[in-house]
Amino acid sequence: MVNSRLTVALHVLCLLAHQGAQPLTSAYIAGSVNTNPVVIRRILAVLRRAGLVTSRPGVAGGWELAAKPSSITLAHVYRLLAPGPVFAMHSKRPNPHCPVGKGIQRGLLAHYRKAQTALEDALASLTVADVLREVVARGE
C-alpha cells in the first residue's frame, strides 16, 4: 500500500511556511492538497503534538507554523508519520527447512537497514525551507 502521509504533511508545512503569519483553515489547506479536511486535520494533529504547528481558534483563526521552516527536516517529519521501516520482513516466519527460507531474513536485514539509513540520511539533509524554495522557484 502506498502511503502519501509524508507528502501531504510536507505540502501542509510548505503551504504554512509560504503564508507566514497568516493562519490557514484546514478547509483551505485541504483545497490546496485536494483532499478531505479530515485528512488534513489528522496530519495537523500529529504535527501539533510535535510542536511544528499551532492552531488559533475563532473567526480569524486557523493553523500556523510554530517552527522555522529551516529547522524542520524532512527526516523529522518522516519519523513522525512513518508507520515503520520502509521494508518489512515476512508477516509469518518462512519455512526453516527450506534452503532459502531459513536464511532469507538474515540475508535481507542488513541490506534493508542500509537502505533505511540512506533514506533517512537523505531526508535529514533537506528542510521544509529547501523544499519550499524549490517549489516556488519552479512554480509548482
Image (cartoon, rainbow, N blue to C red):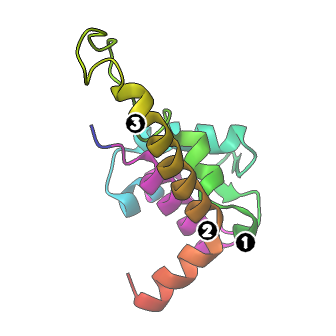
Q: How many marks?
A: 3
Counting residues from the N terminus, which is met first, the one under dot 3 or under dot 2?
3
Q: Which mark is residue 128?
A: 2
| In the rendered image, the vertical position of residue 6 relative to residue 133, given as above or below | above
User: Circle 1: is it few (<14), some (14-19), or many (20+) Cα within 10 Å?
Assistant: some
What distance separates the C-alpha of mark 3 from that of mark 2? 32 Å
Q: Which mark is residue 70?
A: 1
Asked whether residue 96 is drawn in magenta, I would say: no
Q: Which label sits in the foreground, 3 or 2?
A: 3
Q: Are marks 1 and 2 in contact (CB under 8 Å)?
A: yes
25 or 5: nearer the eye? 5
Counting residues from the N terminus, which is met first, the one under dot 3 or under dot 1?
1
Q: Amino acid at mark 1?
A: Ser
Secondary structure, mark 2, is helix
Q: Quadrant of the C terminus?
A: bottom left
Residue 88 drawn at (x, y percent): 40, 31
Q: Is residue 59 left or right of residue 93?
A: right
What distance separates the C-alpha of mark 3 from that of mark 1? 35 Å
Give residue 37's quadrant in the image. top left
109 or 63: nearer the eye? 109
* The magenta segment: 3-28
Q: Which mark is residue 108?
A: 3
Q: Is residue 65 left or right of residue 106?
A: right
Q: Residue at x 64, y 45 (%)?
A: 47
Q: Is residue 17 left or right of residue 100?
A: right
User: Circle 3: is it few (<14), some (14-19), or many (20+) Cα within 10 Å?
Assistant: few
What distance separates the C-alpha of mark 1 from that of mark 2? 6 Å
